[in-house]
């Protein structure tokens, strides 16, 4: 579930930094009026975050990640002068992630000695992915007792 389109112009900027070179930057902007008409609304949300990682790899190297996430939503609503109230909402999203991560665990003895240790054999392990999505919603309200809602969506997830 994503954020609703705001009722009025809304914007925000969130920047965070932390240990292990953790960073996060998020920008959000949305509005309910385009060309002074309440029939249109939209928002856009962009996020970039990552970190160097906390594992101590035996041979050195990175154990962190980076992720880019961008989503947008656009809505059109019929005006109040028509008999059938209609609404169309389109959401598009893209996510790209790269992580120096592994499924390779530690032996119990090594974990007890240093739970942040990473074996040298895990250095070439990578998690690279892309996720595309599109969602469309159509709503027609005929009266207070009867309406039709239709949703269609496509998600594509690729992992290299």
Image (spheres, rainbow, N blue to C red):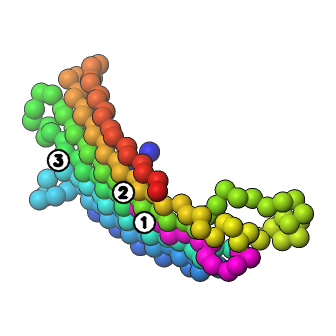
Horizontally, is 15 left or right of 42 in the view? Answer: right
Where is mark 2, residue-wise?
A: 94
Q: Is residue 10 visible?
A: no
Where is mark 1, residue-wise?
A: 68
Q: Nearer the viewer, residue 76 or 105?
A: 105
| Image location of residue 23, percent across then percent down | 53, 76
Q: Residue 31 carries which label?
A: none
Where is mark 3, residue-wise?
A: 39
Q: How far apart are marks 2 and 3 (CA)?
A: 26 Å
Identify the image quadrant of residue 135: top left
Q: Residue at x 13, y 40 (%)?
A: 79
Q: Residue at x 50, y 65 (%)?
A: 98
Q: Do the residues labelled 2 and 1 touch (CB within 8 Å)?
A: yes
| Image location of residue 28, percent across then percent down | 37, 65
Q: Earlier in the sequence, mark 2 or mark 1?
A: 1
Identify the image quadrant of residue 21: bottom right
Query: In the image, is residue 104 above or below residue 90?
Result: below
* Magenta residue span: 57-69
- Looking at the rendered image, the quarter that the N terminus falls into is top left
For disc 2, the neighbor class at 10 Å (few under 14, some 14 to 19, many from 20) is some
Q: Residue at x 67, y 56 (%)?
A: 103
């Amino acid at each position: 579930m994503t954020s609703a389109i705001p009722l009025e112009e809304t914007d925000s900027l969130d920047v965070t930094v932390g240990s292990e070179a953790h960073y996060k930057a998020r920008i959000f902007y949305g509005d309910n009026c385009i060309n002074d008409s309440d029939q249109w609304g939209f928002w856009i949300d962009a996020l970039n975050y990552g970190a160097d990682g906390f594992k101590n790899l035996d041979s050195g190297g990175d154990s962190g990640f980076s992720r880019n996430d961008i989503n947008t939503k656009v809505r059109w609503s019929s005006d109040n002068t028509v008999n059938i109230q209609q609404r169309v909402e389109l959401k598009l999203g893209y996510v790209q992630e790269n992580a120096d991560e592994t499924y390779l665990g530690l032996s119990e003895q090594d974990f007890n000695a240093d739970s942040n240790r990473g074996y040298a054999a895990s250095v070439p392990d990578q998690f690279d992915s892309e996720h595309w999505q599109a969602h469309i919603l159509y709503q027609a309200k005929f009266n207070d007792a009867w309406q039709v809602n239709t949703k269609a969506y496509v998600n594509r997830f690729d992992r290299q």
